[in-house]
Amino acid sequence: MGTSGHRYKVVLGYGTCGIAAGATGVRDALEEAEKAGGYDMDFDIAGCMGYCFIEPVVEVFDSEGGSVIYGDMTAKKVAQLLDEHIKSGKVIEDWVVRKSDQPEAGEGDFLANQHRVVLRNCGKINPESIEEYIEIGGYEAAKKALATMSPDEVIEEVSAAGIRGRGGAGFPTGTKWGFARKSPGDIKYLICNADEGDPGAFMDRSVLEGDPHTVIEGMILAGYAIGARQGYIYCRAEYPLALKRLDIALEECHRRGFLGEGIFGSDWDFDIRIKKGAGAFVCGEETAMMASIEGKRGMPNPRPPFPANQGLWGKPTNINNVETLAAIPWIIANGGAEYAKTGTEKSKGTKVFCLAGKVRRSGLAEVPMGYTLRQVIFDVGGGVQAGKEFKAVQMGGPSGGCLPAALLDTLVDYDAIIATGAIMGSGGMIVADDRTCMVDLARYFLSFTQEESCGKCTPCRIGTKRMLEILERICEGRGEPDDIDKLDELAADIKAASLCALGGTAPNPVLTTLKYFRNEYEDHILNHKCTAGVCPALITLHIDPETCIGCGACVKVCPTEAITGEKKQPHVIDVEACIRCKMCLSRCPEDSIIAE
Amino acid sequence: MDQIKVEIDGSEFTAPAGSTILEIARANGVYIPTLCYDPRLTPYGACRLCLVEVEGARALLPSCYARAEDGMKIQTTNEKLERIRKTLVELLVSDHPMECMGCEKSGRCELQELAQRYDITESGYAGEKHEYIEFSENPFVTRDYNKCIMCGRCIRICREVQGVGVYDFVNRGFEAVPGTPFERPMQETPCEFCGQCISTCPTGAIKARPYEGDGRVAARDILRNACAYFHMSEEEMTKALGLEEWKVRTTCAYCGCGCQLDLHVIDNRIVEVTSPLMEGAGQGNLCVKGRFGYDFVGSRERLTRPLIRKGKKFVETDWDTALDLVAKKLGGTKKKSGADSIAVLASARITNEENYLIQKFARAGIGTNNVDHCARL
């Protein structure tokens, strides 16, 4: 990272996550300081660095290439940063997240335990500048391929890398490209699937916001390999910053002749258009996505015919996920064999996970395939938040499953994860602690799929609705003994009969929680107990008189005035008046309120 | 055309390449249940009832959609498939009003027939049911989406066959339902009221208002099967069973297309008009005139004998008298003012052969080329 003659370069993580945490104030303050002068520094923005748990994040590079990352930045802290670090060269130790010369300090092991290929540029370059991408070797892979490789050679390289589709299903990318290449027809299409929609998944957004040119370069390579002249990026409209940065990137590519007619001086034309998705989860499914691009209601169609034979407008079409495409330039630049050095026998390379939920360090984690889930959650993610116990990890979003602590040594590997009943999915990893009710979690995911079902096929439209009703009834304490059997039966038929993968995988959260946490279902139905203390109908709240300090914080928030007590004396909850909203629980400074 | 060989439930069949599994099964009398299938429409694959097991396939395939390949081994029925089908029908029934008693469609409702086949009287998956308002804002079509099973046939027939596209789905998931743009009344859409949506609706969700309450048609399939069994015509069978209703096959008289009509008659009164599926010129399709323009047949004002004007009054007469008068007047006019003073206007409501005779009459009989046709107007 050059500091263009200045002593320091200050880079602010300016993705949607950082902005949500207040990065705009930090940016304004830094820009003002740069404009005012007097500081020996350059200021620039970058995409998300992945430190969700401590956003906004600022990285200060010195002229020797070393860097310090500060977290939890605010506009107010900027002045101190400028005075101490930029003016006096003094690192503010209390704020340090990571130091390049002391990788173990602070939260350093978050990054130290990662292996970044897809995220290689995220948080390092300004995503709105093609120059910065070119400076670090961007578009070299595309130039090389177009000048020296045949399309078949590109496919061979990708096949040699062994990369499998990162959208979730894990189909070998090289093979998929081969199908589209061999499919007869003059007109072919390439689609980049950026309709990321799993709750708790945000890696595609981070890549698009942080390194859009990598995705575009990946698309150029994919288009060249399959023989497509037109590419589409299907990106959900709820990602305005990603769309804005893609727009800028496409415009710069057009200006430089990287897209359009005869690109990179070759005789091959390739262009990319953006299609904004209107917020339907099902449009992430290939056939629904193509229907949506064609201007129809986003509803899936049965396969076969597969997109490679009859896709967009009836033409051979290849669809790849953002993360897959982002790995392609690296593979072409460094060789498939180099990529394949990382990973397990059947799952090569790296996988980006979005750590969320009750994990201590939430954020973007790119790890080699073959890591254990334990390594991802504990070594990278820092384990469960203070004072709680790990209970489960939900993988693969609404199509995935919940795995218990006993399976923490499962490898990050498509086939190993499928064997557990979960799926790799797009990479959402939601950590649950002992205060998470697994029935409630299954209910949540099913309510999501039910709402996002397109309504076309019977099992998904009505079947998931009936499963959801059963789960709601169990959570409300009205479960019946044969409900578990009913869930099992419905789940099996929905999986077998649904038209697309949305319905076909919708029962997974229920099936895996039934498999690994059946006792919780039985507790709800037979004993009318929610041991995690979550389901309002099945819990009572009381105050531990040993630890209550009588501060009265709970009294103030209780909407039904159910809590009484003298000041500085243990308080009491009137069970009859309590509506179990748990407002008190979140306010108690001593964790004295017990839900069980 | 290339032929392929497939094995369905152990029997081998030959079919033209490109056929779907369902087409081959139906052509050979193998039953596969369907709800979203209509041979007039492109396959859709939504109801999932026609799922079959194909050897070597990763998943069950919708037979309406999947094209058969040479050498394919297909199972249309087994324990798993029947269990799934029963669950699917139960799910559909769980969101269906159980009011078959008063439903126009009873006896020829495709959902009712499947419920009967799978012995479902109430769903094992009871839950929330929709409560939509019935739309009957126009004189032709009533839409009761409580009975809708989301097969999409109305949407597809309107778009694919009529080229109009009045409907599409609105909302998602359990709340998804067909609808007009912004819930506009149908008369404010490009709807032509051809009633094709009525003709394809498998349940009582879309009904024809003109037929409402006029008595319903007997279960045709049952009748047809019984006829085949006893070697009787449908007429004989209806009479033998003492059924009041009779179905008269005729050709639509509104234009030269020649669509086949089935007039459903009770007590010598037409109560409904349908068109036999995949037969005749129309292949089961009708327009607004053919489907709904039948009330003139039983009209009291309908002319049954020729009338001759006497002074200010019309007086009934016989055909010979009337035709003699017309011949005399035409002859007189021709003599007085020449043949070209006469013009002959033919009608789309008669056959091509009759129209041919009319121009022959004009040219050879009268001697004029002044011949025209109302369809040009």
Image (cartoon, coloured by chain):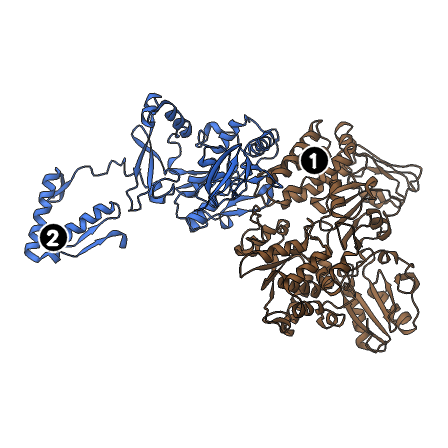
**What is the number of callouts on the image?**
2
Q: Position of residue B54 (x, y in %)?
A: 57, 38
**Amino acid on which the number 1 mark rests in the picture:** Leu
Quadrant position of the C terminus of chain A in the picture:
top right
Q: Position of residue A368 (x, y in %)?
A: 80, 54
Circle 1 SS class: helix
**Chain A palette colour:** brown
Q: CA separation, marks 1 and 2?
A: 84 Å
Q: Position of residue B220 (x, y in %)?
A: 40, 30
Q: Can residue A566 be seen at all in this image of the molecule?
A: yes
Which mark, by number, is residue B366? Answer: 2
Which mark, by number, is residue A471? Answer: 1
**Chain B palette colour:** blue
Q: Can residue B130 be seen at all in this image of the molecule?
A: no
Report in which chain the residue with disc 1 lies. Answer: A
- Tag 1: Cα neighbours inside 10 Å, few (<14), some, or many (≥20)? many
Report in which chain the residue with disc 2 lies. Answer: B
Report the front residue among A527 and A135. Answer: A135
